[in-house]
Every structure is written in structure tokens, then in C-alpha cells.
Amino acid sequence: MTIRIVLADDERMVRSALRAILSAEPDMEVVGEAATGAEAVTVVRDRRPDVILMDVRMPEIDGIRATEQILGALDEPPRVVVVTTFENDSYVYDALRAGAAGFLLKRADADALVQAVRLVSRSDTLLFPSALRDLAAEHARAYPAPPPWVARLTGRESEVLRLMARGLTNAEIARRMEVGPATVKSHVAAVLAKTGTRDRTQAVIAAYEAGFMNSRP
């Protein structure tokens, strides 16, 4: 299956470099470009990509608001990957909380870029789980008590969420828990439903912010 990609960055040279790398892959196609956040929303609506590489700081509206609008407007929105200069930028965390699936540093090499696009298109693991953990720890809000969803998780679901936060894929979780992939997929779906989150990244952020990852298994 060909992965359809939109590039959103206000620097033409950055978009050209990304296009050259991704277009060289047999399973990828760049179907659109945007130089502003507002333009990104329009291009995504028209082209319906699978993945959008989104710069955070852009004219008109920034990548955070663009991400919110894209995810809120489409029934089947693309996976958003934030492309950033600094991984500890507060804008990155805000974008992840807004619904971005992960982030990628602008200094990443071509192999890392290609791998990241393939990874998020599969939607079964996290980009840079250790960095996500550090961002969540730095920006987490203090809860006076655990959110209600914590108590609603079963033991198996709690275990799956902890393994998700470590960056394991569904297949790796299945091997660790000695169950079938379909069982893991069912547990992941239950975790997303109970935490009220869209995807794995959002569930892991919710887990860290709730103090779930600091509690005993």
C-alpha cells in the first residue's frame, strides 16, 4: 500500500528536502505541500493523506491549531507527525496533546525520517517513547486524585498500557504477555475507550499525566 503524505512547513527548502527523500521510496507518495497552518488544513481536506509532517511554528495558524482542526474535521484524519528543531520545545508537547501521533527532529537523517513515516502509518507503536516520557514528566499537570479511568482498567489493560508506554508494538506485547495479537489489539482498544483517547500517543500522555506510570503495577 502506498503511504500518501502531505508536507507542511513554511520553508520551501525544508519541504523540497523532505519531498526528495520520501518520493524516492517505492511505498510513499507526497501528494501535497503547505506553507502555512491554514493551508495545511485545506490541503489535507482536499488530498486526504495518510500522514502529514507538520512544522509547529508557521504563519496564519501554528501547527498545534492546524492539528486540532484537521483531527476535528475529518472522520478518518491522517496521522500527524510534528517536525521540530528542539525535542523539549513546549510547542511539541502541546501538539502531542492536541492529537499529533509523534514528533521528529529536523536534524534526523533520511533513514529515520522514512522509518518514522512507516511507523506512524501502521499506528501500532510510539515514536521515541523515552522522549515522550521525558516531555510528559516535564509538562504533566498535578492531579489531586487519579482520574476515574484508572480504576476502570482491568489488570491486563493496565499491563498493556504500561507496555505501550515503553514503546512496544502489538506483536511485542503479545509475546511478552503470551497471548495472541488479536487479544492485544482488543486490550488496546479498551484502553483507548476507557482513557477517552484517540490513539496510543494520547493514551500514554494521559497515563503519565495521571501518575499512572509512577504507581505500582
Image (tube, rainbow, N blue to C red):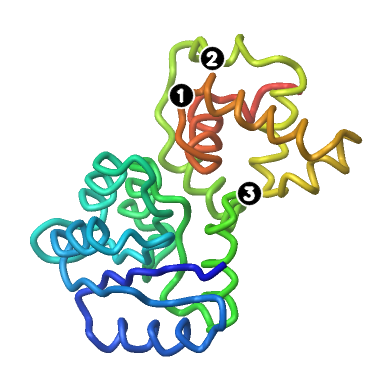
Residue where numbered disc 3 is placed? 124
Q: Give the image location of residue 56, x and y in percent.
A: 28, 61
Residue at the left extreme?
60
| Residue on which disc 2 sits | 149
**On screen, residue 50 above or below 187:** below
Picture coordinates of residue 151, whole percent (x, y): 61, 9
Earlier in the chain: of badge 2 and badge 1, it is 2
- In this image, 11 relative to 71: left or right? left
Q: Earlier in the sequence, mark 3 or mark 2?
A: 3
Q: Is residue 211 left or right of residue 159?
A: left
Give the label, 2 or 1, closer to the camera.
1
How far apart marks 2 and 1 lie (CA) works out to 8 Å
Name, please, the residue furthest toward the right.
178
Q: Residue at x 30, y 53 (%)?
A: 91
Q: Depth-wise, is mark 3 or mark 2 nearer the camera? A: 3
Residue 137: numbered disc: none
Question: Within 10 angstroms of label 1, few (less than 14), some, or many (20 or more) residues?
Answer: few
The picture places residue 152, in percent across and down from the top left corner, at: 60, 10
Q: Position of residue 82 (x, y in %)?
A: 38, 61
Q: Residue at x 13, y 59 (%)?
A: 38
The kind of residue on which mark 2 rests is Trp
Residue where numbered disc 1 is placed = 196
Under mark 1, the amino acid is Gly
Left or right of 109? Residue 158 is right
Whole-Å distance between the Cαs marked 3 and 1?
18 Å
Tags 2 and 1 in contact by the CB under 8 Å rule?
Answer: yes
Helix, strand or loop at label 3? It is loop
